[in-house]
Image: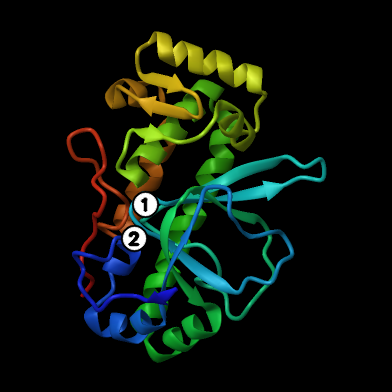
Amino acid sequence: MKPAAEWNPDTIDNNLLRALRADDWAIIGPRLEDWSAPSGTVLHQPGDTVRFAFFPRGASLISYLVVFEDGRAIETALVGREGAVGGIVSHGRLPAYSRAEVQRGGTFFRIDLHHLEEAKARSLTLRYLFARYADCLMAQVFQSVACNAAHSIEQRTAKWLLAAVERTGTDDQALTQEQLAAMLGVGRSYLSRVIQDLRQRDVVETRRGRIRVSDVDGLRALACECNDAVSRHFDDVLKGVYPAEENGVAPLAVGQEGG
């Protein structure tokens, strides 16, 4: 691991960090480490003491999952380059409630929570930015609860794939139908029928271990409104942080320098 690069918003491929002012980056940047992990890496389990915060970069993704006694793990939030995971708002190394797992491997910024707390103590604007992000993440969790209760499996599947496209900037997602079914909390055979229907509509293509979105607009027409609702809240609270679309696929680095 090595320290993060010097302040340059064009090369900081995490939108939340891109929103920092240069003087705030001077505080937190030297404490950030370049870190990488493959898909499936567990960052923490329920009850673990959270030691680090992770900022996904580029196309990397992290899932928050609630783990049940029977071993099922249901996704409650998907975090990409718009955000961070692990102790961003809390004070100290508190025990984790959920599992945090790398959904799409790649590169991350990582910071020890002791260093993060020191940085927040030195800068009111850092504390303010991360508190506003926590509000956005809570909105995503609220929307997920409502979505699971109100919308069909087809709508939720389309919503998840759209969210992944926006966050990664690519229409090709490396995951199996079994993994997606588990995260959505549905049976594998049920999801297979949904994916088959999406294939027949020519909005997705599948091959072993991958799902590719071939028609973003067509998929959006089948999805529920939940991802758009979360995106609007991000834009209201942290304008420019939530990944925006360009020519049908989200760019890899979207954000605005805070001021």
**On the picture, is 6 further left or further right than 108?**
left
- The image position of residue 158, as x and y in percent, is 44, 27
Quick check: 119 left or right of 214? right
The residue that appears at 35% across and 38% down in the rendered structure is 165
Does residue 234 sit above or below 180 in this rendering? Answer: below
Comparing 189 with 234, the one in front is: 189
Label placed on residue 237: 2
Label 1: which secondary element: helix
Instruction: Please tell me whether mark 2 sits on a helix, a strand or a loop.
Output: helix
124, above or below 167, in the image: below
Location of residue 223 in the rendering, given as x and y in whole percent from the top left corner = 41, 26
- Quadrant in which the C terminus appears: bottom left
Quarter of the image that includes the N terminus? bottom left
Name the residue nearer the viewer: 174 or 166: 174
Q: At x 74% / y 64%, what residue is drawn? A: 47
- Identify the image quadrant of residue 123: bottom left
Q: Position of residue 161 (x, y in %)?
A: 43, 33
Is residue 189 shown left or right of residue 4?
Answer: right
Q: Residue at x 36, y 56 (%)?
A: 82
Picture coordinates of residue 63, whole percent (x, y):
54, 49
Compare residues 159 and 1 and report the one nearer the observer: 1
Q: Residue at x 52, y 16 (%)?
A: 194
Task: Name the residue that disc number 1 marks.
Answer: 233
**Crowdedness of circle 1 by 10 Å Cα count: few (<14), some, many (20+)?**
some
Identity, as a three-letter code, of the amino acid under mark 2:
Val
Residue at the extreme bottom: 122
